[in-house]
Amino acid sequence: MKILFVGPSLPDAAALCGDAIRVRPPAAHGDVLAAVRAGATAIGIVDGNFEHVAPVWHKEILHALDKGVAVFGAASMGALRAAECDTFGMVGIGSIYEDYATGRRIDDADVALLHGPAELGYPALSLPLVNVDATLDRLEVLEAIDKYDISRLRDIADSLFYKERTWPAVLKKAGMGEGEKSLLQLLHATTVNRKREDALTLVAAMRSFLPGAPAKQGNWTFRATSLWRTATDQPTAQRNV
């Protein structure tokens, strides 16, 4: 059984995965443990909850790896956890993961965005910085915007709180003047959804995955600490897996 935790990065995941992968909402603390207990052979983490609930715990990922369960991560919370746990066997996928794994990107907030509820398809209400950077990179290659303006827009986007970051907000703070309307149209038309791209790559990897070699890597031993025992004694399944 393969289980994928995903939300705003790939709102149409259920239709894309079909019966091959069980799609669940963004992961929170305890969800990976519950998936292991439910018999998962592969777990994918794309999106995760972090503001109003405890985020997915590194310890439960290590527990999954120790049990031989393959764990994949990409795009958002999954990319963060994969960069932190790849030496233990978690498989990081995509350019966002690579940025965190190599240290080119260090701020967790770069993948964060404000979005609507699952019932409405997780509509994006703000713009994650990883998508801003990818879009400006493309426009720089196309030479569609002056390099000075690209650098300025990049710095302004980086300075905005993730819930407030939108193209109109970036341009308003930049004070682009008469060209603001046409530039906004260009940005909307050219926006690169890097998080979706990486999430799709993870889905492809999970589809083709066949359980075989042990997921755990390196010479380490999982320690069932007192905190772990206390946490796992509590109900862990926040939702059916």
Image (spheres, grey):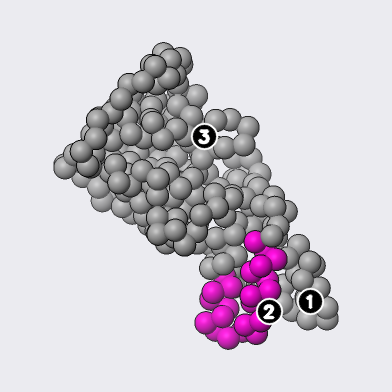
Residue drawn 69% across the image and 60% down it: 159
**Crowd tier of the residue under label 2, counting other residues whose Cα lies within 10 Å: few below 14, some 14–19, many 20 or above:** some
* Residue 218 visible here: yes
**Which residue has dot 3 on it?**
55
Specify the quadrant that holds the C terminus: top left
- Residue type, mark 3 in image: Pro
- Measure the alpha-carbon separation of dots 3 and 2: 37 Å
In primary-sequence order, the first of circles 1 and 2 is: 2
Query: Which numbered disc covers residue 176?
Result: 1
Residue 84 to residue 38: above or below: below
- The range drawn in magenta is 135-158
- Residue type, mark 1 in image: Met
Q: Nearer the viewer, residue 236 or 58?
A: 58
* Residue 198 visible here: no
The secondary structure type at the circle numbered 3 is loop
Query: Which numbered disc covers residue 149?
Result: 2
Residue 107 location in percent, x, y?
55, 52
Q: Cβ–Cβ below 8 Å for labels 1 and 3?
A: no
Residue 141 to residue 102: above or below: below
Residue drawn 66% across the image and 44% down it: 116
Q: Cβ–Cβ below 8 Å for labels 1 and 2?
A: yes
Residue drawn 67% across the image and 63% down it: 157
- Measure the alpha-carbon separation of dots 1 and 3: 39 Å
